[in-house]
Image (cartoon, rainbow, N blue to C red):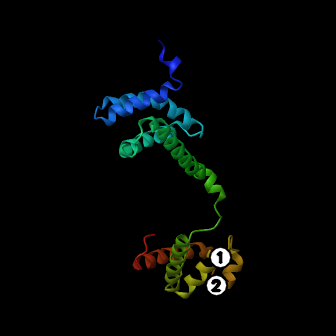
Amino acid sequence: MDSTATDPDPVWSEAARCFRTWAAGDASGLDGLVRVMTPVLWHVVRAYRLSPECAEDVIQTTWMALVRRRDAIEDATAVGGWLATTARREAWRVSNVTARSIPVDEEEIRQRLPRQRSAESSVVERDTGDRLWEAVDSLPERCRRLLRIVAFENRPDYSRLAVDLDMPVGSIGPTRGRCLAKLRVALLEKGADW
């Protein structure tokens, strides 16, 4: 006689039988329970639209919960419902966590960041500028004036610069080169790694 004709829920009955075997100390009962109930658990978990990896983790967590709490189940016929409920709750919990943490491409994040410098880069830049201008201030007056003008003007007018500094137009470039060399030495003396 076909057992499915007389048994309205053969999966639940088989799960209860396997659970009793396992509870009696026979590990093959747990193997049978896993074989019978895992397809049911997959069906429960899929309803939460988890990724295959997350669904696998939920099912594994469900089985681990059963192993830890086996003694809490007093009625073997309740094991199927207990497993399904545990899987449903874990799937719900995981789906809420994964719904809140959607991975975002790094480029998309970069586009949404404010266009301001970090506090660290501002401090480093300010410190570098302070050391630079401290080194400039240690140079002779003529070099200080020339380097300040060159630093703040994109393309300085050499004829006007020659008048302002009281020097021939042709000596501005070589003087600037000598002043930059002095500045480099002053920075090295101050321990700058430029």
- Total numbered badges shown on the rendered structure: 2
Q: Residues within 10 Å of mark 2 (few under 14, many from 20)?
A: some
The structure residue drawn at horizontal position 49% and vertical position 81%, both measured from the top left corner, is 135
Q: Which mark is residue 183?
A: none
Dot 2 amino acid type: Leu
* Secondary structure of residue under mark 2: helix
* Secondary structure of residue under mark 1: helix
Q: Nearer the viewer, residue 137 or 131?
A: 131
Q: CA distance from mark 2 to mark 1?
A: 16 Å
The structure residue drawn at horizontal position 34% and vertical position 30%, both measured from the top left corner, is 29
Q: Which residue position holds label 2?
A: 165
Residue 134, percent from left and from top: 50, 83
Q: Earlier in the sequence, mark 2 or mark 1?
A: 1
Q: Which mark is residue 152?
A: 1
Point out the residue furthest to the left here: 25
Mark 2, mark 1: which one is toward the viewer? 1
Residue 137, percent from left and from top: 52, 86
Q: Residues within 10 Å of mark 1 (few under 14, many from 20)?
A: few
Q: Nearer the viewer, residue 181 or 95?
A: 95
Dot 1 amino acid type: Phe
The structure residue drawn at horizontal position 55% and vertical position 87%, both measured from the top left corner, is 141
**Relative to residue 22, is residue 81 drawn left or right?**
right
